[in-house]
Image (cartoon, rainbow, N blue to C red):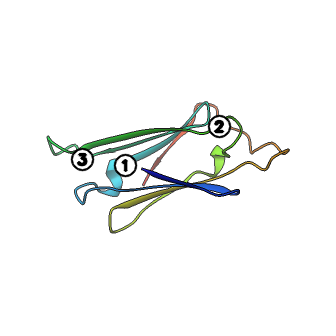
Amino acid sequence: MIVHSTPGSHSLSVNLPRVIQPEMVTVSAKKGDRLDVVADAWHMEHDCHYEWQIRFAPGDADMSTVRARFGQDGKLTIDVQRCIPGQSCSPRFGMGFRYRC
């Protein structure tokens, strides 16, 4: 997974194999400014499970702004806005959330 950060946002991207379809990808925002990403082609036995845990610096990412998109070319892109220094971010989710691509 490639991470590109600017002063305003983080963008994470990865090219997944063609066998991975959008309904096989789960992005979960967790406590502690963490994203868990799982891509699993459950119908296959080999080269079918991909998993990442991304931790942002405390207070750096506004976890309420997580957006994921899955391109037809198999590219998964996740965008997260950064918090503005000196201002608090939007309220955090209690137990996190899950987003299916």
Q: Position of residue 64 (x, y in %)?
A: 65, 47
Q: Which residue is mark 3?
A: 41
N-terminal label among 2 and 3 = 3
Helix, strand, or loop for circle 1? strand
- The quadrant holding residue 67 is bottom right
Q: Amino acid at mark 2?
A: Ala
User: Mark 2 against mark 3, which lies toward the viewer?
Assistant: 2
Q: Position of residue 56 (x, y in %)?
A: 60, 39
Q: Amino acid at mark 3?
A: Ala
Alpha-carbon distance for marks 2 and 3? Answer: 31 Å
Name the residue at 41% across, 40% down.
52
Q: Position of residue 38 (x, y in %)?
A: 37, 42
Name the residue at 34% across, 68% down.
72
The quarter of the image holding the C terminus is bottom left
Q: Amino acid at mark 1?
A: Val
As displayed, is residue 6 above or below residue 90? below
Residue 77 left/right relative to 32: left
Residue 94 left/right relative to 70: right
As displayed, is residue 39 above or below residue 77? above
Alpha-carbon distance for marks 2 and 1? Answer: 24 Å
Other residues around mark 3 within 10 Å, as few (<14) / some (14–19) / many (≥20): some
Mark 2 touching mark 1, by CB under 8 A? Answer: no
Q: Which residue is mark 1?
A: 25
Q: Farthest residue to the left: give it.
A: 45
N-terminal label among 3 and 1 = 1
Name the residue at 70% across, 57% down.
8
Other residues around mark 2 within 10 Å, as few (<14) / some (14–19) / many (≥20): few
Q: Position of residue 16 (x, y in %)?
A: 31, 55
Helix, strand, or loop for circle 3? loop
Other residues around mark 1 within 10 Å, as few (<14) / some (14–19) / many (≥20): many
Q: Which mark is residue 73?
A: none
